[in-house]
Amino acid sequence: MGCLRGVILVILVRCGASITCAQISWTTRTVATDADGCRSVFAVDVNGDGSVDALSASANDDTVAWYENDGSQSFTKRVITNSANYANFVVAFDVDGDGDVDALSASRNDDAVAWYENDGLQSFGKRLVATTADGAKNVVAVDVDGDGDVDVLSASANDDKVAWYENDGSQSFATRVITTSASTIYQAYATDVDGDGDVDALSASYGDDTVAWYDNDGSQSFTERIVSTVAEEGQSVFAIDVDGDGDVDALAASYALDSILWYENDGAQSFAERVVTDAVDGAESVYAADIDGDGDVDVAWAGYDSDEVGWHENDGSQSFSGHVVGEDVKVAYQAFVADVDGDGDADLLSASFRDDTVAWYENGCETAPPTSTFAPSSAPSTPFPSTTPTPRPTVECASVSFSERIITSSASGAVYVFAFDVDGDGDVDVLSADITSHTIAWYENDSSQSFATRVITDAADYAYAVFAIDVDGDGDVDALSASAYDDTVAWYENDGSQSFTERVITTLADNAISVYPIDVDGDGDVDVLSASYNDDTVAWYENDGAQSFTERVITNSADAARSVFAIDLDGDGDVDPISASSNSNTVAWYENDGAQSFTERVITDSADGVIFIDVSDVDGDGDLDVLSASGDDDTVAWFENDGSQSFAERVISPTTTTCSARSRRRSSSSRSSGPCCSTSRRTRRASAATRATSSASSCCSSCSRASSAPATSCSSTRWAATRPTSSSATSSSA
């Protein structure tokens, strides 16, 4: 999710399930055989029904089409246009920010770059971006200038041009030329190559054998930087962190050399050529993703002369072994990667010219235990490629020891921590929420793990949770928070220079203590979920694409809601929330029917005082398990998913204590016998800022936190009713 300033190419490889493939077999599936002269393929959920649809551009019939997936991977063709004269390329994104998926195309014979406005019912109106892209070859959707709307970038072969088209916010586009010296350019791409927070461009040009990138100075003035001049007859270019060292490398397909090449970035944008393979006859297309789920970047390709599509497997040290996936793919033009069938692994797609075919190749992943864990493993999929360091496979250690490294000792009431590359410089920064100082802060890593404190806000009253993600899709990392005493869920807009402006999502989440971002409704923007303790509510806030949020209640019966998470738990292509509620000892998930109507499914109601949940494929069997931490039975547990979302508890770490021995816990045998052990969890988990004095009963010292005065007895009062003023906040723990 890194700090790309607005790159919004859709990458659809689903990694939330953490599937690692011990072995892969491939099955060819046909989407269509009537895309006359098919040259391009793309995949995205066009109609928002939770399944992945396909799109194609076909030159001989001037057609851009999408293929509706019925959820069982049976596809029905829907024509978007048949007037894109020699359609060369197609992508899809929400161009106008209205919450549905639009399409874009580049067509050669009319020199046109166009977008097709989806009315929400998948009826598309053609809108021209430009008719001056002479011999238009490809198109990219990207927020080049970081102003929050979708610009367009194109490559055109006959005028050797890379251009971008500035969106004024109303989808009126002004042409801005990046270069006119990319001789017979075949493809352009966009990403933040140098990690400075703005969008750069890349090109592969056939006529001069050149791969180049164009350095954006932040004001959209571009300077050409050469990657290679020996990529003979370069056809395709892509960019991603191939070697996982935190910077962006480049890839290219060289037709004349039959080669797929990658260019290792040394961190200062000096590139060294590395050969992935020199055995793809007529290498036409390159794409990169983690195809086998082992945590490194693999490479997919199409061979024009070999009539093949395939992939090269990265062993984690950037040594690649080849696998042919599709044979007899007549004049293979493009390879693409997406999880077409929603089973958690990466499938391939192809466009082939001579046989007029759009095909997908089902990954028959045979699972193995995961070799690496991502943090967060289920972070919301972003609409642009990541430049955060690619996790390397975990090294198996005979023994492990840890050394403490202090980030800060001044966060006196720190209750939550998160790690993310906030400033996009390739290293991991840290964020915290502090209840005592009401502060959301991030700690800038200087790459030597020396951290400098940067305050985002000190006005999040009883700040309880923090998260980081690009909320507004402008390519930089924003922050989110949940703060209990002002009932607020907020996000903090990053201006690209890590100056943050608060944007309030809601002030009605009564004692908000958990927040999680994900695209709940599958419309391509980041929605937000919250858990609020006093109103027993788990809610999600629908983003309209312009970061205006509407509350949607999932449940208001999660008794003392403490934690919320979301992921496609049942593998049906939509996002399901998961919650922990302390008073009912319940971990539950809420099954999404695809239209964001949710049905509660209880995982357990015996996680005594549960306070936190997470999700991962613990046993590596290809489905998602749930983990919990519960305070009153001192238990860390995981709940094994049998694949049908029936869960069996597996205890990781139980500890038996009694109320008298540890005042912040209570034994099950004494829940109703004494004033401490009979009080509600809601009261006992109130502010540490009002902890009882030493003269109070030790048994009641935990529940006295709910009152601003020392307590000698505990009553079942709601936390919100007894919130201390900020001046009384003196304790450093919660």
Image (cartoon, rainbow, N blue to C red):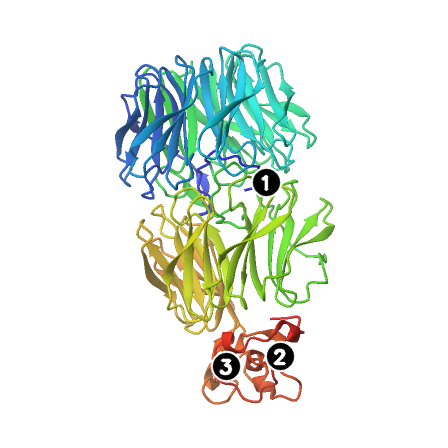
**Is residue 236 visible to us here?**
no
Near mark 1 (Cα within 10 A), the count class, few <14, some 14-19 or many ≥20, is many
Q: Is residue 109 left or right of residue 514?
A: left
Instruction: Indicate the position of residue 69 as horizontal and vertical percent values.
Output: 29, 36
Q: Which of the marked residues, 3 or 1, is nearer the chain's N terminus? A: 1
Task: Name the residue rendered at 72%, 45% in the picture.
Answer: 446
Residue that badge 2 annotates: 691
| Total marks in image | 3
Near mark 2 (Cα within 10 A), the count class, few <14, some 14-19 or many ≥20, is many
Instruction: Indicate the position of residue 13 as horizontal and vertical percent values.
Output: 44, 38
Quadrant of the image occupied by residue 49: top left
Residue that badge 3 annotates: 667
SS at mark 2 in the image? loop
Between 673 and 651, the one lying in front of the other is 673
Q: Quadrant of the C terminus?
A: bottom right
Q: Is residue 11 above or below residue 723?
A: above
Q: In the rendering, which numbered label is found on residue 3? A: 1
Q: Amino acid at mark 2?
A: Arg
Q: Which of the marked residues, 2 or 3, is nearer the chain's N terminus? A: 3
CA gap between label 3 and label 1 equals 48 Å
Instruction: Indicate the position of residue 133 as horizontal and vertical percent values.
Output: 47, 16
SS at mark 3 in the image? loop
